[in-house]
């Protein structure tokens, strides 16, 4: 590491990654946003799933000011962030075969819907099976992952495949294996993960693309407004009522 301070180095690293995904993933982002717009226009529902810290990016697009009101969180008990004790249980559950099938069987997902699956490594059983089973139901799947893991690690699924192998569209976050941007002689391990910053930006870019695509077609995007601006609650109440049959987080 140079003499520059770690804070600045980390921010610069995150900016470099954001520029990479802006330039290198532009076509995939456009395709993913178009898929979401198509789903909304055709009467489908939108869902997002992520396990562990990948769930943060999924949660960021659900019931979000400036976001699509139709985006629902597909929650798996025990793997949404660090909501269980011990926290290591969540990581263990990601490796359990069959869990994704049980979750989907109990979920409202159906043919014609779209599911965004976020998994940095894409190597565990849960995201792989979630994608496989969802597509078998007729659900379109967008995967947000780091493709580097498929080249540098082994899959933990019996098939030997990764999330990226079972998606209609893949958004590559470009995050290096290990998810740590900085090293320092006095620190025994790499540190400063950037996956949340980059993944959230990818997902927000995708939803922004969807909103603009709907508007271009003459369809008012079902967007939420901040409840902290005048008229925000009234606006949201109208949108939530209009799309109440496609929104599940309000029940």
Image (tube, grey):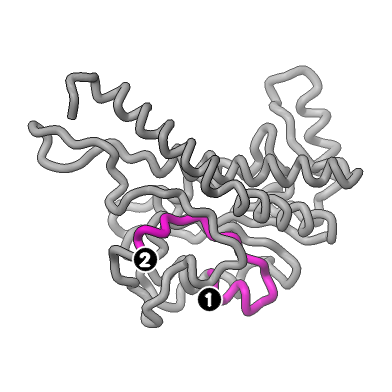
Task: Give the x, y percent position of residue 162.
Answer: 42, 70
Q: Is residue 146 above or below residue 239?
A: below
Name the residue nearer the viewer: 36 or 78. Answer: 36
Q: Residue at x 88, y 45 (%)?
A: 219
Label 2: state its secondary structure: helix
Residue tagged 2: 150
**Which segment is the magenta one?**
131-150
Quarter holding the N terminus is top left
Q: State which quadrant residue 124 falls in.
A: bottom left
Say whether disc 2 or disc 1 marks the residue closer to the N-terminus: 1
Evaluate whether residue 75 shows in this view: no
Residue at position x 60%, y 62% from top? 169
Question: How many neighbours does mark 2 have within 10 angstroms: few (below 14), some (14-19), or many (20 or more)?
Answer: many
Q: Does the magenta segment cover residue 167?
A: no
Residue lying farthest to the right in this orientation: 218
Pointer 1 local density, CA inside 10 Å: few below 14, some 14–19, many at least 20: some
Q: Are marks 2 and 1 in contact (CB under 8 Å)?
A: no
Q: Which residue is mark 1?
A: 101
In the rendered view, would you say 153 is above or below 25? below
| Residue nearer the viewer, 231 or 191 | 191
Give how far apart the Cα atoms at labels 2 and 1 are.
23 Å
Disc marking residue 229: none
- Residue 212 in picture, x, y percent from top left: 77, 40
* Residue 73 percent location from the top left of the image: 60, 53
Q: 68 left or right of 181?
A: right
Q: Is residue 228 visible?
A: yes
Q: Position of residue 236 (x, y in %)?
A: 78, 34
């Amino acid at each position: 590491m140079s003499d520059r301070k770690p804070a600045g180095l980390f921010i610069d690293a995150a900016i470099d990654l954001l520029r990479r995904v802006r330039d290198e993933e532009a076509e995939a982002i456009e395709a993913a946003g178009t898929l979401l717009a198509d789903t909304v226009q055709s009467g489908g529902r939108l869902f997002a799933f992520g396990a562990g810290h990948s769930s943060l990016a999924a949660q960021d697009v659900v019931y979000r000011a400036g976001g699509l009101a139709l985006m629902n969180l597909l929650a798996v008990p025990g793997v949404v962030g660090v909501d269980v004790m011990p926290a290591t249980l969540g990581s263990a559950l990601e490796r359990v075969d069959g869990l994704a099938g049980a979750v989907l069987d109990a979920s409202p997902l159906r043919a014609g819907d779209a599911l965004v699956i976020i998994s940095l490594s894409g190597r565990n059983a849960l995201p792989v099976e979630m994608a496989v089973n969802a597509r078998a139901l007729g659900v379109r799947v967008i995967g947000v992952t780091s493709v580097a893991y498929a080249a540098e690690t082994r899959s933990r699924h019996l098939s030997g495949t990764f999330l990226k192998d079972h998606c209609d569209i893949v958004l590559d976050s470009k995050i290096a294996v290990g998810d740590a941007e900085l090293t320092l002689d006095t620190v025994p391990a790499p540190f400063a993960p950037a996956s949340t910053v980059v993944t959230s930006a990818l997902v927000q870019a995708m939803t922004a693309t969807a909103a603009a695509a709907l508007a271009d077609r003459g369809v008012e995007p079902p967007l939420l407004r901040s409840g902290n601006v005048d008229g925000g609650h009234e606006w949201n109440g109208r949108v939530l009522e209009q799309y109440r049959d496609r929104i599940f987080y309000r029940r």
